[in-house]
Image (spheres, rainbow, N blue to C red):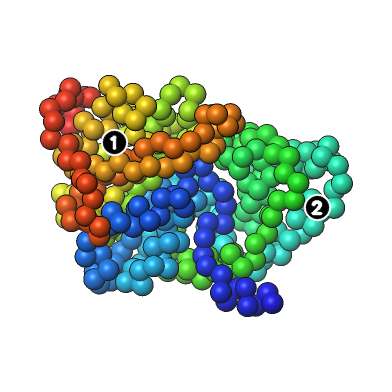
Amino acid sequence: MTEIRSITAKAKPFIKWVGGKGQLIEQLDAQLPAAFNNWEDVTYIEPFVGGGAMLFYMLQQYPNIRHAVINDVNPDLTTCYRTVRDMPEELINSLMDIQNVYNALLTEEARKDFFLAVRDRYNEKNLDPIENTTKFFFLNRTCFNGLYRVNKKGFFNVPFGKYTNPQICDPATIRKDSELLQRVEILTGDFEATFDYAQGNTLFYFDPPYRPLSDTSSFNDYAKEAFNDDAQIRLKEYCDHIDDAGFQFMLSNSDCKGKNEADNFFDVLYRAYFIERVWASRSINSNPNKRGKLTEILVHNYAATKVQPNVEYAQVELEPIYAAEEV
């Protein structure tokens, strides 16, 4: 039975990740370049891989992607990807061990104590890849809301999640993901370093830490370095570099105007490109009354998409965000 599941299973994110694109896959697919199916020897690059929902979808949906490059500034996350790719069986065995120990604990207090002990050990930052990834998976599946958040020292600080029977080890998913990741190069560092890997028919997909819609809505602290408005502007300038080189890109981010009609940050920033607004559900707020649907933006530098959208092309003169000499 296990073998049948492993053969028929589809690759999917092996961790929970805030802002994951699973719910938006169809809308993202529709915004790909119109002729993307016919591109040959495609290089696909994700400079902010996160949970990898788009990555695993693209690798399964488009066999013309011969080479993929993923990157993230979070070294623990990229260690997870390398471990899943290179040591799936060792990881499965380690995850089964910690899952069995955890499930044998009969009280919430005992499970919380175990969780805190694992978190402390994880934060020592001196673990080998198997142990580090095992603890990453465990914390991801047992912490509050599956969040990944670190403090300014880079220490994981999400509290215990009180789940009754979390699945810590999913062997079929790990094996399928490992198979797909064989053709993926994994980088750790700044997003701009990915440019050196672009060649020929290259598509970049950017899913950066989203710009917060309010002072209390930021869930982008998955690395000790903040991704502030200066970083958002630097990312836009990197998109200009990609566009000038003749490569294609698509980018997701929060829709500031959906929250505040006067907030034209992204409409000004990306006014040289095509901006589409899509609906996305938000479910990470601890208050259920604050969950629901909000618009997000998709920006791309090509006019023709797989499904011609009602493209909003930002041609309106707006107050600039930064001085012209800074562009």
Is disc 1 placed on a helix, strand or loop?
helix
The crowd level at tag 2 (other Cα within 10 Å; few <14, some 14-19, many 20+) is some
Q: Where does the image place residue 42, in percent across and percent down from the top left?
A: 29, 67
Q: Which mark is residue 103?
A: 2
Residue 173, picture quadrant: bottom right
The crowd level at tag 1 (other Cα within 10 Å; few <14, some 14-19, many 20+) is some
Q: Is residue 261 above or below residue 108?
A: above
Q: Is residue 41 above or below residue 287?
A: below
Decide if residue 194 is in sight here. Answer: no
Q: Where does the image place residue 34, in percent across and percent down from the top left?
A: 22, 61
Q: Residue at x 87, y 46 (%)?
A: 106
Q: Residue at x 48, y 36 (%)?
A: 292
Q: Which residue is mark 1?
A: 234
Q: Residue at x 22, y 37 (%)?
A: 270
Amino acid at circle 1: Arg
| Mark with earlier residue (1, 2) | 2
Which quadrant is the N terminus positioned in?
bottom right
Q: Nearer the viewer, residue 251 or 80?
A: 251
Q: Is 283 on the left or on the right of 312, as rendered?
A: right
Is disc 2 placed on a helix, strand or loop?
helix
Q: Nearer the viewer, residue 305 or 237?
A: 305
Q: Where does the image place residue 327, in percent across and percent down from the top left?
A: 17, 32
Q: Nearer the viewer, residue 49 or 299?
A: 299
Q: Where does the image place residue 311, in percent across and percent down from the top left?
A: 20, 45
Q: Is residue 256 above or below residue 60?
A: above
Q: Is 17 on the left or on the right of 59, as rendered?
A: right
Q: Residue at x 50, y 51 (%)?
A: 51
Q: How many marks do you count on the picture? A: 2
Q: CA distance from mark 1 to mark 2?
A: 46 Å
Q: Nearer the viewer, mark 1 or mark 2?
A: 2
